[in-house]
Image (cartoon, rainbow, N blue to C red):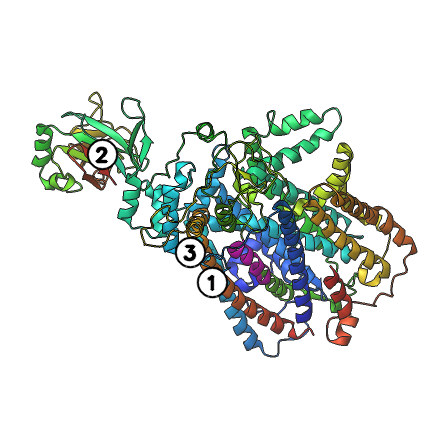
């Protein structure tokens, strides 16, 4: 019986695997370029976030990316999760002006942000964003690592992937060559172009690779803030199920003992 | 005591209820003492697994609906709010999302088992057909559920699938407009999909009830495909199969947990985390994996109407499978030719699944066409033909004899082989 | 599942070929496995229940700022806080005096006026009747304010005084005082 059970389980696994592989194959066909894995602290099945890295990543988002990219699904209060204190969160929120209203006179007004406010978007609407960016829409970054093949690895690769176009390739007006962008022509100018472009609060040397890594990690956290809780719970659930499975199987053996 | 059911239960409360409404007697009869063939292998777990999965989907779905907003401008954000702000929202949503995949894995194995061991043959034709109805309802439910997060794949999947109906001559376009409630997939479409996505699972529950009711009239098939000849061939369902199902359930939950906790988006498509944009179609539209074989059949046929007919036909064909298969022998263990042709059909099904995920160009089209041809040929040519020409192996006398003789599972090799090949 | 949940020691009722040779061992195993499964089911139920509690964004919105610059003496404003009305009333000297003059023995829910305000003219209470949750009248000068000059609940006739205390009618408690602080002379943060 045990043998047969193992075989059935193997078959079920094979079926899921084939299904998964056909998905994977379908995806591989889409991305023509190989994305180098960046080896993040959260990359493995049990990996966790590095809070210092996330904080540096947030600094980069705030000082560089947020000029064009919104993150409208996040609130300032979420920053508590990357290790900012309540006072720091309040200060970050208060440093931006948020539109509120209407007031008693029926007018909209601006006020300093609060922890409960969503991240302020750089543009009022997508049309305004396009108008300011040469017709290209900078995507919202809230779930960007879930929305791209390769996730954080892809974002990291993209940020360090700017290069001179190969001979013979003429770039369209306002476009930039990028090794890892599908089609290689991207409207975004290299956002992190030189070492020391900004100064990290924790004194980390701000190389382009470091900055790209940190902001990719931050974006991964933004897309999957539940990742650590999820994995920790997963370990506990699997341990529980393994014990329950052993017990159930023992009961099953006992119950069936008199049949065989 | 006229009018009261003659209850055998001692507990006074149970007895009082049972005399007036014999649910306990019924449960005892259908799930307690129900005589079940003693030689089930673990493939017979998958019916119970499907039942559990349905319960999980309905439970998580009800709680998701408490926080979901069916409006084009709010749907995407409301799903992300569930993921971020609702307590354990991420867990409930990921269980529901991956639960759909688990449901199809479980049901496909269940169907495969029915086909391999000939469970669809007389007298279980109606039981089988009810199963096909459940499968169709599941596909409709899954399709509409996938639309609800209102990502790019939701939107374009809905557009492509609803447009299938435009292939119908004369009234096609009117039907599509009716489905949409407008001139494109838009808010009315999202709203009705939400309504139907909530409704259909309960219809499935109803059909499952009929499916089980029919099963308990004919009794279960078994790996040998021969009917039990007496009490020596059966075991009471409880505790033998309740405990055996429990083992399967725990293993199933472990696979489920690995998906939910460690690879929740593995079976999904990243494009569905991009909010729906009616002005831009993603480069490669791919349905969820469980639709890929049928998607491949659709694309294999160069004509629009014929493609749609082939796709629906490939599933509807299952309804008449009991009459296409002319062999009197149920289990493929005793059908030397059909066994291999069916295993080839199984491989072919995976080929279709693989091809459905590839772009519709070049060699993929050729492969899809060959695989589609074999898919239909198996049902329409090979099975009817084999009924006439195949010489089955001698059947065992009864279930208990081979089982008891060896003291272990019978033809171990015979069961093992097909599993590995599949 | 049902089997493991309800550990039963009854042997199969029909067709059970043999009685178990080591019945106690099986029963103990069943009990352990059954308890384990029961714990598992219990653990599964909690996330579902907890998902119905207020979500994080709902909890985060738990404070409201009110500008009281333009609320003249004798006037009142109603602001929304956690989906409920909050009454902010600029009391007159006479109203304050009335509120202070009431002996505690006359009150159903004894509380002094001082205990219910932080700055004397400003009374801030949750505008929800403690009987069954209606919004009492009395914010507008044209509203009936009941027999004690505060608020009057039209649903079941509860009368509140100028400190928001229950004086007559079915309501058991005074109007609740929310947590609030004066951030400046003109700004109050509720919650």
Q: CA distance from mark 2 to mark 1?
A: 55 Å
Q: Chain of mark 1?
A: A
Q: Which residue is mark 2?
A: C169
Circle nearer the N terminus (3, 1): 3
Image quadrant in which the N terminus of chain C is located: bottom right
Q: Which label was assigned to residue A49?
A: 3
Judge by depth and name the residue closer to the eye, B46 or B405.
B46
**Would you say residue C54 is visible in this rendering?**
no
Q: Chain of mark 3?
A: A
Magenta range is: B250-263
Whether marks 3 and 1 lie on the same chain: yes
- Please state the horizontal and vertical placement of residue B131, each as a whole percent of the image: 70, 48
The answer to whether residue B310 is above or below residue B107 is above
Whether marks 2 and 1 lie on the same chain: no
Crowd tier of the residue under label 1, counting other residues whose Cα lies within 10 Å: few below 14, some 14–19, many 20 or above: few
Q: Chain of mark 2?
A: C
Q: Which residue is mark 1?
A: A236
Whether marks 3 and 2 lie on the same chain: no
- Please state the horizontal and vertical placement of residue B293, each as a whole percent of the image: 71, 46
**Would you say residue B48 is visible in this rendering?**
yes
Instruction: Spot the residue most to the top.
Output: C142
In the visual, does C159 lie left or right of B223?
left
In the visual, does A105 lie left or right of A24?
left
Q: Are marks 3 and 2 in contact (CB under 8 Å)?
A: no
Q: Nearer the viewer, mark 3 or mark 2?
A: 3
Q: Is residue B251 magenta?
A: yes
């Amino acid at each position: 019986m045990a043998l047969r059970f193992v075989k059935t389980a193997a078959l079920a696994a094979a079926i899921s695997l084939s299904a998964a592989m056909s998905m994977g194959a379908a995806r591989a066909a889409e991305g023509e370029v190989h994305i180098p894995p960046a080896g993040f602290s959260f990359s493995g099945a049990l990996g966790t976030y590095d809070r210092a890295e996330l904080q540096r990543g947030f600094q980069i988002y705030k000082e560089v990316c947020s000029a064009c990219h919104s993150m409208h699904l996040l609130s300032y209060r979420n920053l508590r999760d990357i290790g900012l204190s309540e006072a720091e969160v309040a200060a970050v929120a208060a440093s931006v002006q948020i539109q509120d209203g209407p007031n008693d006179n029926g007018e909209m007004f601006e006020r300093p942000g609060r922890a409960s406010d969503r991240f302020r978007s750089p543009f009022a609407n997508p049309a305004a964003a396009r108008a300011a960016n040469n017709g290209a829409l900078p995507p919202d970054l809230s779930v960007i690592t879930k929305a791209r093949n390769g996730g954080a690895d892809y974002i990291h690769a993209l940020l360090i992937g700017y290069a001179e176009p190969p001979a013979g390739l003429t770039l369209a007006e306002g476009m930039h060559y990028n090794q890892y962008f599908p089609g290689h022509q991207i409207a975004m100018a290299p956002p992190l172009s030189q070492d020391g472009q900004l100064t990290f609060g924790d004194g980390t040397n701000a190389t382009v690779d470091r900055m790209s890594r940190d902001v990719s990690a931050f974006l991964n956290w933004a897309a999957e803030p539940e990742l650590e809780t999820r994995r920790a719970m997963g370990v506990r659930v699997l341990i529980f199920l393994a014990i329950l499975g052993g017990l159930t199987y023992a009961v099953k053996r006992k119950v069936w003992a008199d049949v065989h | 005591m006229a009018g009261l059911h003659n209850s055998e239960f001692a507990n006074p409360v149970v007895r009082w209820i049972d005399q007036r409404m014999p649910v306990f007697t019924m449960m005892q009869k259908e799930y307690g003492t129900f005589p079940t063939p003693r030689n089930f292998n673990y493939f017979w777990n998958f019916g119970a697994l499907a039942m559990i999965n349905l319960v999980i989907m309905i439970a998580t779905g009800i709680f998701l609906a408490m926080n979901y907003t069916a409006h084009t401008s709010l749907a995407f954000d409301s799903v992300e709010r569930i993921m971020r702000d609702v307590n354990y929202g991420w867990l409930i949503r990921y269980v529901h999302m991956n639960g759909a995949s688990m449901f199809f894995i479980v049901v496909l194995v269940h169907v495969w088992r029915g086909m391999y061991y000939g469970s669809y043959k007389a007298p279980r034709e109606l039981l089988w057909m009810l199963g096909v109805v459940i499968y169709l309802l599941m596909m409709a439910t899954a399709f509409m559920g996938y639309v609800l997060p209102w990502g790019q794949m939701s939107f374009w999947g809905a557009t492509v699938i609803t447009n299938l109906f435009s292939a119908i001559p004369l009234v096609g376009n009117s039907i599509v407009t009716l489905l949409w409630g407008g001139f494109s997939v838009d808010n009315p479409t999202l709203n009705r999909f939400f309504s139907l996505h909530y409704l259909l699972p309960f219809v499935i529950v109803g059909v499952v009830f009929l499916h089980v009711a029919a099963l308990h009239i004919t009794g279960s098939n078994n790996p040998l495909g021969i009917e039990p000849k007496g009490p020596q061939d059966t075991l009471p369902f409880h505790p033998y199969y309740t405990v055996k199902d429990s083992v399967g359930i725990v293993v199933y939950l472990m696979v489920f947990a690995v998906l939910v906790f460690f690879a929740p988006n593995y079976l999904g498509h990243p494009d569905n985390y991009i909010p729906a944009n009616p002005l831009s179609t993603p480069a490669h539209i791919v349905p969820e994996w469980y639709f890929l074989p049928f998607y491949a059949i659709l694309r294999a046929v160069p004509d629009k109407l014929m493609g749609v007919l082939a796709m629906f036909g490939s599933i509807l064909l299952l309804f008449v499978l009991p009459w296409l298969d002319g062999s009197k022998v149920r289990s493929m263990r005793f059908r030397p030719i059909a066994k291999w042709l069916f295993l080839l059909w199984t491989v072919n099904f995976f080929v279709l699944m693989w091809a459905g995920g590839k772009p519709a160009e070049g060699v993929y089209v050729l492969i899809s066409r060959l695989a589609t041809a074999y898919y239909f040929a198996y049902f329409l040519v090979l099975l009817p033909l084999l009924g006439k020409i195949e010489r089955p192996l001698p059947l065992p006398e009864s279930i208990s004899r081979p089982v008891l003789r060896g003291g272990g599972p019978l033809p171990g090799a015979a069961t093992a082989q097909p599993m590995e090949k599949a | 599942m049902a089997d493991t949940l309800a550990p039963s020691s009854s042997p199969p009722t029909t067709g059970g070929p043999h009685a178990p040779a080591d019945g106690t061992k099986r029963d103990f195993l069943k009990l352990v496995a059954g308890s384990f499964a029961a714990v598992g089911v219990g653990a599964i139920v909690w996330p579902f229940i907890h998902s119905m509690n207020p979500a994080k964004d709902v909890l985060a919105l738990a404070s409201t700022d009110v500008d009281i610059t333009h609320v003249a003496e004798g006037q009142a404003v109603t602001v929304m806080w956690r989906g409920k009305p909050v009454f902010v009333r600029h009391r007159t000297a006479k109203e304050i005096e009335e509120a202070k003059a009431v002996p505690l023995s006359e009150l159903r829910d004894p509380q002094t006026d001082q205990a219910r305000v932080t700055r004397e003219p400003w009374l801030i209470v949750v505008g929800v009747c403690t009987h069954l949750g209606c919004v009492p009248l009395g914010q507008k000068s044209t509203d009936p304010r009941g027999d004690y000059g505060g608020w009057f609940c039209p649903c079941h006739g509860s009368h509140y005084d100028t400190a928001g205390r229950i004086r007559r009618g079915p309501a058991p408690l005074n109007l609740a005082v929310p947590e609030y602080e004066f951030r400046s002379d003109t700004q109050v943060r509720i919650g």
